[in-house]
Image (cartoon, rainbow, N blue to C red):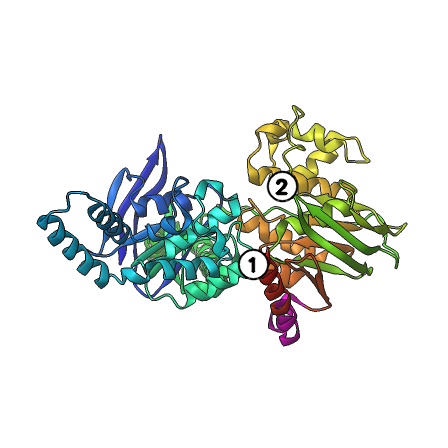
């Protein structure tokens, strides 16, 4: 059990949290939700002991172990994972140090014996195999298990640190955006792990599908308070909306009652025969208090892609495209035809392959082999995964966006920025100083203002808060044109795509007209995927 007791955190004059009292108990997974800036990650830091609150305390059941993500770049991967159980790791190192002593004494022998007993009691002999199981489940290949952390790429590091947090069955597990940088297969593995996890989990995530799958409770941060709801994200949304509706209806009834009392008092206060009744109603009026209903701090952008012209039957033909990146063939003889009703979700663990395909289709790089042809009626808008070059400019937002608008009017352009929550002076911010979420919203503004009939989006939900992801999801569902996209957000893929193309480790593809959930449940697809993945692993071992 972990409990926040009267927690207050002040940043200058502003109180981020005010007298928060909440208890997280065993056997439950709590989704910690709230708007950007509400303090989700900060609250996790307070719970973990990494940040001292202004007032209040965090109480943890004595003897229970808490685990949270921390970076260890200088250690081997397998050691980093085992560090998830600090006491076990310390015993391992202390034992090794004793056994390596040249002047091994009787006292050393007694100490080593005590450590061995504790090591066995903690199931230490299975530590490496347990760590390897976690790493394999998250997609970290065995050849990387003894690599130094600093040599791994960003996605691999995140997976290792997640394995570290999960290792050793901690009593309390704090996870801040654990699905970031995980591919959909790794997310599915993590979902199953947490569903079967018996201890306390508190997780921050912008992935609605993930929260719905794993969470038994939802803790909502709004206006410095945390309200606990039983149930997952969807249950919280329905419950919070119902509560708000009931409070508004109750206030409406009170307002009607106040009006009636005021009218009676106004009419009869001077009437001697009615004076007692008027006085009684004055007392009743004084007792009526309207509920103070604050609007949520959450803000939803408005995302609406409207193509300027209807798309024809010939959209895109891809024939035999192959591409090798850094000696690895990421695309191998890829061919497919896109129809005018297609919304294609590109999935698969190899993110480089998906990005490479999109870059080829947008003319940014050339394929080694093969061709592609866009239909004459098509116009494309592209959301790149790496937008570093785009924002390397001293232009302000409104001037940059005006370049892509047929109507060169600042007021017109600011209208699109306003939809994306850039209010007032935000439009004169320089492009290079924007945050990750702001950059995404600017790029989506560009896609709206271009009025294209084909959208290509490479991981557009990265850096977005829950409200923006929901708005984007709605915009994609409503879009009448063609969409080619990749996303780590399961719900976006499931609700947007009517066709799935999975790029396999060998660069080939599986192409099926289906929803994402139906694709995952398909026995035929499972066999094909297993065959390709097994062949890929055999080829790696042979090399």
Visible residue check, residue 410: yes
Pick the front one: 409 or 9: 9
Q: Which residues are magenta?
A: 515-529
Residue 526 is one of the magenta-drawn residues:
yes
**Extreme-front residue of the structure:** 102
Pick the front one: 72 or 268: 72
Q: Position of residue 430 (x, y in %)?
A: 62, 26
Residue drawn at (61%, 59%) of the image: 539
Pick the front one: 288 or 115: 115
Which residue in the structure is indicated by mark 1? 541
Residue 221 is one of the magenta-drawn residues:
no
| Residue 449 horizontal side relative to residue 472, left or right | right
The image quadrant where one finds the C terminus is bottom right
Q: Secondary structure at mark 2?
A: helix
Secondary structure predominantly adopted by residues drawn in magenta: helix
Q: Secondary structure at mark 1?
A: helix
- Above or below, 415 against 133 in this view is above
Which mark lies nearer to you, 1 or 2? 1
Of labels 1 and 2, earlier in sequence is 2
Which residue in the structure is indicated by mark 2? 441
Tell me the tag on residue 260.
Answer: none
How many discs mark residues in the rendered view? Answer: 2
Q: Position of residue 16 (x, y in %)?
A: 37, 40
Q: Position of residue 496 (x, y in %)?
A: 67, 60
**Extreme-top residue of the structure:** 394
| Residue 274 horizontal side relative to residue 52, left or right | right
| Residue 187 horizontal side relative to residue 14, left or right | right
User: In the rendered structure, are the residues bearing label 1 and label 2 in contact, judged by CB atoms less than 8 Å apart?
Assistant: no
Quarter of the image where one finds residue 172: bottom left
């Amino acid at each position: 059990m972990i409990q926040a007791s009267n927690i207050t955190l002040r940043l200058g004059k502003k109180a981020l949290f005010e007298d928060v009292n909440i208890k997280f108990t065993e056997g439950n997974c709590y989704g910690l939700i709230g708007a950007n800036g509400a303090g989700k990650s900060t609250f996790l830091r307070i719970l973990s002991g990494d940040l001292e609150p202004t007032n209040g305390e965090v109480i943890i059941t004595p003897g229970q172990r808490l685990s949270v993500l921390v970076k260890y770049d200088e250690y081997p991967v397998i050691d980093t994972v085992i560090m998830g159980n600090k006491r076990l790791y310390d015993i391992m190192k202390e034992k090794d140090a004793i056994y390596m002593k040249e002047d091994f004494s009787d006292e050393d022998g007694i100490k080593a014996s005590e450590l061995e007993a504790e090591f066995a009691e903690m199931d230490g002999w299975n530590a490496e195999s347990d760590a390897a199981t976690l790493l394999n489940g998250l997609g970290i290949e065995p050849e990387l298990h003894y690599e130094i952390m600093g040599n791994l790429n960003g996605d691999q590091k995140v997976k290792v640190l997640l394995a570290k947090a999960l290792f050793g069955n901690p009593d309390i597990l704090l996870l801040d955006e654990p699905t970031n940088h995980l591919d959909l297969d790794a997310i599915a593995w993590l979902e199953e792990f947490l569903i079967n996890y018996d201890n306390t989990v508190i997780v921050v995530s912008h992935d609605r599908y993930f929260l719905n799958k794993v969470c038994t409770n939802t803790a909502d941060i709004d206006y410095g308070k945390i309200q606990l709801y039983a149930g997952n994200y969807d249950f919280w949304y329905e419950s919070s909306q119902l509560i708000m509706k009931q409070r508004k209806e109750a206030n409406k009834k009170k307002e009607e009652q106040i009006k009636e009392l005021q009218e009676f008092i106004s009419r009869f206060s001077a009437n001697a025969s009615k004076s007692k009744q008027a006085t009684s109603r004055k007392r009743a009026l004084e007792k009526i208090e309207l509920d103070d209903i604050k609007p949520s701090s959450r803000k939803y952008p408005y995302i609406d892609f409207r193509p300027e012209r209807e798309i024809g039957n010939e959209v895109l033909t891809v024939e035999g495209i192959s591409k090798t990146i850094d000696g690895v063939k990421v695309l191998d003889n890829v061919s497919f035809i896109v129809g005018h009703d297609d919304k294609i979700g590109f999935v698969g663990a190899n993110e480089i392959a998906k990005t490479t395909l999109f870059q080829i289709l947008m003319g940014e790089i050339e394929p080694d082999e093969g061709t592609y042809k866009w239909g004459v009626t098509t116009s494309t808008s592209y959301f790149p995964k790496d937008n570093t070059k785009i924002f390397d400019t001293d232009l302000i937002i409104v001037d940059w966006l005006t370049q892509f608008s047929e109507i060169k009017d600042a007021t017109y352009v600011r209208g699109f920025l306003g939809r994306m929550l850039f209010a007032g002076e935000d439009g004169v911010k320089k492009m290079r100083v924007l945050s990750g979420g702001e950059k995404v919203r600017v790029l989506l503004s560009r896609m709206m203002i271009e009025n294209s009939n084909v959208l290509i989006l490479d991981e557009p939900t990265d850096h977005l808060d829950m409200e923006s992801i929901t708005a984007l999801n709605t915009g994609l569902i409503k879009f009448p044109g063609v969409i080619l996209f990749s996303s780590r957000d399961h719900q976006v893929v499931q609700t947007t795509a009517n066709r799935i193309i999975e790029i396999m480790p060998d660069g080939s593809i599986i192409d099926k007209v289906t929803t994402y959930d139906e694709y995952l449940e398909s026995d035929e697809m499972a066999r094909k995927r297993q065959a390709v993945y097994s062949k890929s692993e055999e080829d790696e071992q042979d090399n």
